[in-house]
Amino acid sequence: MYCQTMSRTRRLFQLMQALRRLSPPATAQLLAQETGVSERTLYRDIETLRGLGAVIDGAAGFGYTLIEDASLPPMTFEDDELEALVLGLREVIEVGDPGLARAAETALGKLRARLPDRQAHRLQHAVLSAHRVRPPPRPTIDPNDLRQAVWQERIVRFTYSDAQGAQTLRSVKPLTITYFETSHCVMSWCLLRKDFRAFRLDRMQHLEVTQDSFRPQRIPLLRTYMKMLRQSAKDCPPTA
């Protein structure tokens, strides 16, 4: 019974996420696909969410729109703040790795579901946007694993190809991930070169997150690296 309850709770959470993220009105068929249930079960889940306080407009055959999300606190933004949020999230959708791009789309859906009507309309039709004719190349490792390694301050190993195609095995202390104009890089202390280096995520392969911790060195190392970059006054950091 406990496992069944947890499974249903997780499904309802996924349904709320889908309602926030998908363009309204979202059809029952699409919502059922998102949550992995039949349309009959989807209709029951919609009624359950309504009973929990979510205001969901629509009906079978017409699609559903999340009008008010009881699980989110009220949000108030100045119009310029809202434009800045929309621009920032759309930039992440354009240049972020697939996981971050999906998260940005979900965040936009949450904003739209909770804002007053006037500001929801402003979000939907914001005058600021972000577009990259040439988006950065896709990472060849899982960026989420790398992000976790940065947060946990764990040394990572990977195979790296330089601009000429020569490969080396690197062990580094990852400090932060930076999104440059032409590529995504992890700013690191390289144990092989005994120096700071930036490694492009699209040239990395076979990422391994070790159990070797370098805590609490990350912030002091990152401050030193950033100070060096500012002093060098170069547009891009030295790459490996």
Image: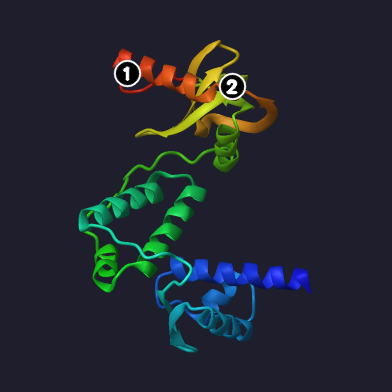
Label 2, residues with CA under 10 Å away: few <14, some 14-19, many ≥20: many
* Disc 2 to disc 1: CB gap under 8 Å: no
Residue 240 percent location from the top left of the image: 49, 18
Which label's residue is closer to the chain start, 2 or 1? 2
Tell me where residue 187 appears, x and y as whole percent: 48, 25
Residue at 55% in and 10% down: 194
The residue singled out by tag 2 in the image is 172
- One can see residue 78 in this view: yes
For the residue carrying disc 1, how many other residues have a C-alpha within 10 Å: few (<14), some (14-19), or many (20+)? few
Which labelled disc corresponds to residue 123?
none
Q: Is residue 183 visible?
A: no
Q: What residue sits 39% from the left and 21% below the top?
A: 226
- The amino acid sitting under disc 2 is Val
SS type, badge 1: helix
Q: Name the residue under label 1.
A: 230
Left or right, 33 with respect to 6, comes to left
Question: Can you say whether 49 is above or below 92 in the image?
Answer: below
Looking at the image, is 180 positioned above or below residue 123? above
> Viewer-proximal residue, 75 or 209?
75
The amino acid type of the residue labelled 1 equals Arg
Q: How far apart are marks 2 and 1 (CA)?
A: 22 Å
Foreground residue among 70 and 8: 70
SS at mark 2? Answer: strand
Image-quadrant location for residue 56: bottom left
Quarter of the image for the N terminus: give it. bottom right
Residue extending farthest top? 194
